[in-house]
């Protein structure tokens, strides 16, 4: 099973037009991943290729358009290349790339490998990348910085929107972290939660559940058990939990004509009871009134100007790597727009945000 995007290391290749970016991409992947041509501007949109690198693990290499593209579509190509900076954990620079690339890489303190043509052998480049990323601080896990005790209860309702025969990604990642952290867990759904607790010798230290049943689970939980949701764990690991809690609390003061952006990481076809497309907007209208405006962005599409919004609500972003989420939080804060995510806004709407454990 292929490692999903949010858990991969993303490394982009930057350089001027015809500097050899696509040649390097093909060298690294040992495939004709990118089109190579002596004509400038061959690469238009970024090209993504997944592979496993010994010492680094799952990696996505990104071939970008040239940064000094003077062709008719050059401006649009360079603009798309600049967006890649918000997606990556590090970069390979070929020759001189200019301050437009260097400055954001330095601001984000990203690892950078500089190369010139002719390129070294493939293994030399991969070894250099491995050494470079050894110094990079590892992204936090879902439970990092939290005292999770010893035993957890996962309450995981499986409604009709859940994939048949398998768990959704946040549940899988949380369960894997239970193993990695040396913890134990009991799994149930909302209907069997009472029986699951009865079979335990002691109350679970933490209960982790789906945002949609937060209030129901809260009512059933033992008094000594702490409670959180999968999307709140992701807010801690991938974004800024404090900023997102503040964002959720702005529901208490938003105007009745508020403009709200729902930013979804997934690009799946929305179902009739989709949480982002249907349930949360309905919840917001019940809370604020029917005059609110709710816009949607999906996948890597995100408005350039977020200053028009009163609130941005992101999903748990399990499909995104951490730099994407952090870039969006920073963009919102720069525009002085509060930002939060599904789990936190549901907790606030249900009146239990101040009662849950963050």
Image: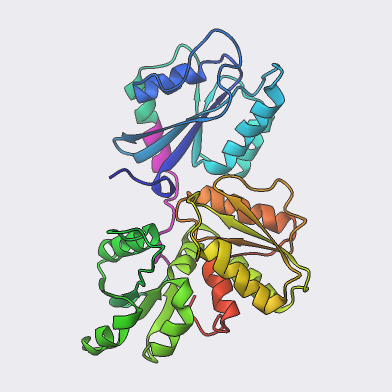
Quadrant in which the N terminus is drawn: top left
Image position of 140 (left or right of 154): right
Which picture quadrant has residue 284? bottom right
| Residue 49 placement (x, y as % from top left) | 41, 31
Magenta stretch in the rendered image? 129-145
Residue at coordinates 38% horizontally, 62% vertically from top-left? 162
x 49%, y 75%: residue? 358
Queried whether the magenta region covers residue 240, the answer comes back as no
From the viewer's perspective, tell me whether residue 15 is left or right of residue 309: left
Quadrant of the image occupied by residue 31? top left
Q: Foreground: 28 or 198?
A: 198
Tell me residue 87's x, y (percent).
54, 42
Q: In this view, does 223 lie above or below 129?
A: below
Q: Is residue 221 visible?
A: yes
User: Which residue is drawn at the image coordinates 56% and 81% (left, top)?
Assistant: 350
Query: Farthest residue in the bottom direction?
Result: 223
The structure residue drawn at horizontal position 43% and vertical position 89%, both measured from the top left corner, is: 219
**Direction front: furthest residue:** 272
Residue 199 or 226: which is nearer the viewer?
Answer: 199
């Amino acid at each position: 099973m292929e490692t999903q995007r949010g858990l991969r290391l993303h490394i982009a290749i930057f350089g001027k037009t015809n500097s050899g970016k696509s040649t390097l991409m093909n060298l690294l992947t040992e495939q004709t991943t990118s089109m190579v041509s002596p004509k400038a501007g061959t690469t238009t949109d970024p090209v993504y290729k997944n592979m496993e690198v010994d010492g680094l693990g799952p990696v996505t290499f990104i071939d970008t358009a040239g940064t000094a593209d003077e062709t008719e579509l050059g401006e649009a190509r360079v603009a798309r290349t600049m967006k890649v900076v918000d997606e990556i954990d590090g970069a390979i620079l070929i020759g001189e790339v200019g301050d437009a690339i260097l400055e954001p890489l330095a601001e984000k303190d990203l690892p950078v490998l500089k190369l010139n043509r002719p390129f070294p052998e493939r293994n030399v480049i991969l070894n250099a990348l491995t050494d470079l990323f050894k110094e990079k601080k590892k992204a936090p896990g879902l439970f990092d910085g939290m005292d999770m005790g010893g035993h957890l209860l996962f309450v995981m309702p499986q409604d009709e929107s859940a994939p048949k025969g398998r768990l959704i990604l946040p549940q899988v990642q949380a369960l894997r972290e239970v193993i990695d952290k040396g913890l134990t867990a009991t799994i149930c759904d909302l209907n069997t939660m009472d029986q699951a607790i009865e079979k335990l010798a002691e109350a679970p230290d933490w209960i982790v559940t789906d945002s949609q049943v937060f209030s129901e689970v809260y009512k059933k939980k033992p008094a000594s058990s702490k409670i959180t949701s999968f999307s709140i764990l992701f807010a801690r690991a991938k974004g800024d939990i404090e900023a997102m809690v503040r964002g959720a609390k702005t529901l208490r003061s938003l105007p009745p004509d508020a403009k709200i952006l729902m930013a979804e990481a997934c690009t799946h076809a929305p179902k009739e009871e989709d949480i982002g497309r249907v349930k949360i907007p309905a919840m917001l209208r019940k809370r604020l009134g029917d005059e609110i405006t709710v816009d949607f962005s999906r996948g890597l599409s995100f408005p350039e100007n977020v200053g028009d919004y009163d609130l941005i609500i992101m999903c748990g972003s399990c499909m995104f790597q951490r730099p994407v989420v952090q870039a969006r939080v920073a963009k919102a804060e720069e525009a002085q727009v509060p930002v939060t995510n599904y789990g936190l806004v549901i907790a606030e709407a249900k009146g239990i945000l101040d009662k849950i454990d963050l």
